[in-house]
Amino acid sequence: MGESLLDCHALALARRAFIQYLYGELNNYANGSAIRSILEATEKDSTKTQLKNHVSIHLLISGAPTGDGREFLPVDCDGPMAPYDLVQMRAAGHAPIYEHPEHGHLRYKLSVGMETIDANPLQRFAIMSCSDKILKWNVLGVQGALLSNLIEPIKLASITFLSGFKQSHTSRAVCCRLEKATDPVRVHHPMIGRVKYPLVQPQDFDADYSYVWSTSFQGEVIDARCGRPVTGGTSLISKVVFLSEYRYVCQRLKIPSIT
């Protein structure tokens, strides 16, 4: 279990590479190399770390995330930005719209391509859309459940799009739709925006391979059809490897690990 990657979209792999990077930073912290790590001890809990004050995390994404942030984009979203959108972006304001009954719905990815379907709570297995994953990170943090035992939640300071951006739809998809939740949810609203001259992505996504890397490891080519490296074995960003690294870090920090 946990040896294969179920989601090989670029966003999912980039976030997993970031988690691998965090394990490297935890090892630097455990070594006593505080100056080399982006992490520091928290004041309220000696068993946890947090980002240093001068460190912030930013996401650069090439196109609209699958799901709510992509399904309802107008065709002119990659043209010149309207004055209103420019003002909203520069003011870091969010003004989501809900003009369609399905606006804001959770969506599942299909097995192939970039299309998604409405989420069915009775479905036993499904892969969250990228929009829904970003939404989750803006509530729980990008560090994941396991690292939440060692690191305070890490929220995205900003999300920059190279294309596929419309402030009213994008803000709804990545954070604002939770304001309509029945139960109160504390959601983080990052700065969002698009580069001045959009870099529109090709529509052909038939490639079966993904490349993932970070400064913490050399990188690997993933066969997206099976979720494993083309060289064989288990990916360095798989759940089973993360669990092993988690146990190792807990041992070094002298913190009880999970069984």
Image (cartoon, grey):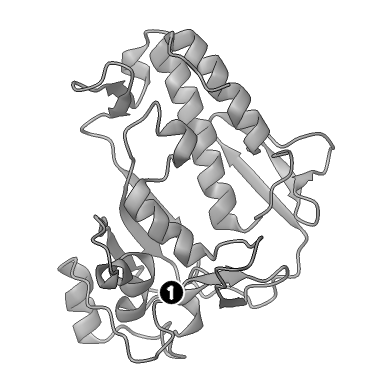
Residue sitting at 48 percent across and 9 percent down?
Answer: 252
User: In front here: 233 or 55?
Assistant: 233
In the image, residue 140 above or below residue 165 = above
Quadrant (top left/top right/bottom left/bottom right) for the N terminus: top right
Residue sitting at 44 percent across and 76 percent down?
Answer: 105
User: In front here: 166 or 43?
Assistant: 43
In the image, residue 204 above or below residue 174 = below
**Quarter assignment of residue 225:** bottom right
Estimate the x, y position of residue 99 in percent, counting from the top left. Answer: 33, 91
Estimate the x, y position of residue 146 in percent, counting from the top left. Answer: 48, 33
- 163 relative to 151 in the view: left or right: right
- Element on which disc 1 rests: loop
Residue sitting at 46 percent across and 39 percent down?
Answer: 145
The residue identified by callout 1 is 198
**Quarter assignment of residue 82:** bottom left
Estimate the x, y position of residue 79 in percent, counting from the top left. Answer: 40, 86
Quadrant (top left/top right/bottom left/bottom right) for the C terminus: top right
Q: Amino acid at mark 1?
A: Pro
Estimate the x, y position of residue 182 in percent, counting from the top left. Answer: 28, 69
- 204 relative to 140 in the view: left or right: right
In the image, residue 99 above or below residue 55 = below
